[in-house]
Image (cartoon, rainbow, N blue to C red):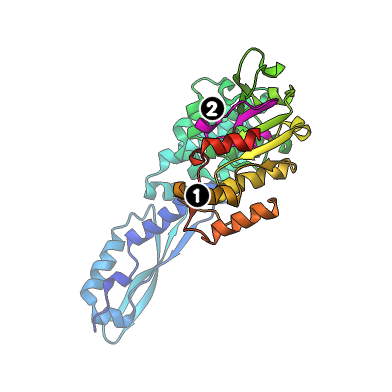
Amino acid sequence: MTVPATRWSTPTDLVAKLRRRWNSGELLTAYARQRWEPIVVPLRAPTAVELAENFGAAQDWLAAWQAVDPTLVRLEWKRVGGRLVGSNEVPHRAVIDSADRVWALLRVKRQVETFLRLVEATRSSVPGLVELMIAEPIKVLDHEPSWPRLVDVVRWIDRHPGTERYVRQIDVPGVDTKFIEQHRGVLAQLLDRQLAPERVDSAQPPARFAERYRFRTKPAYVRLRALARPAPAALGPFSEVTVRVDELAACPLDAVRVLVVENETTYLALPPVPDTVAVFGGGYAVRALAPLAWLHDRELTYWGDIDTHGFAILDRLRQVFPHTASTLMDADTLLRHRAHWGREATPAKAELTHLTPAESQVHHDLIADHYAPALRLEQERIRFSAVKQALTG
């Protein structure tokens, strides 16, 4: 039986092992921390039996190791053999005594010099980042062209605390919002290391960069329409306005009733209703309305699709405003519009705990496909006469 020579360690195997340790960052980290020790790699050499059975392949294997530059790799030998092939010396361990020899073997001397240069430059400007660089040197090298700008961004943010700026206002040469977006991951690591804990909202992921590092975010807006004239004073001469949520929170409307509607066309077509302002929810009703504390003192009504997602929005809205009523989301409305039933693409199965018993029954029937699979009645399919009757009595 011939033993495959591929089982024996080769110089290529040695380089591959070193390359894996380089790619992990282990070698550079040890070097930067001045904890370098000679690297000893055990070699799988032919046994006496293997020499006898495959002597020619063993000679070729040995020649490959004899061709390795001895100024880079020191081989330690052992004697094998016996009566079949005689006594032979084969390498059983490869030793690389210095870091410089490893860099030469892997041809990474330029990368090492670059890394050390970046470390020293960072140490002089933002020393708090150096330990992170040493722990993850390959990440530093992967970002080599951008590294000075990344450090400058961290330094700028560190020197400008407060929540009155947008990310767009970061004023660093060569840096714009696209740069920030493209490097959010590594910037998050650096900022988490550099900034005081109270300046990092760890509940927010790095993808939500502005929120995580307490920059101002794009304001939320709410779209309002007065359903009767005259309009509330806050709307001035306008029948419809779009305003910032934070400003609306500070300026309560004098309307008696607020009606939240999900569908835009339905919102625009609503009939006149005294003392009522309509809000276009657009699927974001809870996020838009939650800051409006004055809604606790208004009649608040929600009208959405009769489907699992419509009830989920109602449930979330009622978590914030428990007094929220619903309209046209009952079994009678559903059954009277059988001809307009549709199909919900991806029904939600979550348990909802803020519905009335009647709403819960409809929601349960939808989940159980009691009337039809994935049943949905969109609010724009409800007859307008039914809408007028429900809203104006």
Q: Quadrant of residue 392?
A: top right
What is the quadrant of the N terminus in the image? Answer: bottom left
Q: Give the range drawn in magenta.
A: 261-289
Could you say which is closer to the camera, residue 192 or residue 350? 350
Q: Which mark is residue 357?
A: none
Can residue 213 be seen?
no
The location of residue 385, given as percent across then percent down, is 54, 36
Determine which residue is flagged by label 2.
268
In the displayed structure, would residue 270 be above or below residue 202? above
| Amino acid beneath label 2 | Leu
Q: In which quarter of the image is residue 261?
A: top right
Can residue 315 be seen?
yes
Residue at 67 percent of width and 18 percent of height: 231
Residue at 59 percent of width and 34 percent of height: 388
Residue at 72 percent of width and 23 percent of height: 253
Determine which residue is flagged by label 1.
376
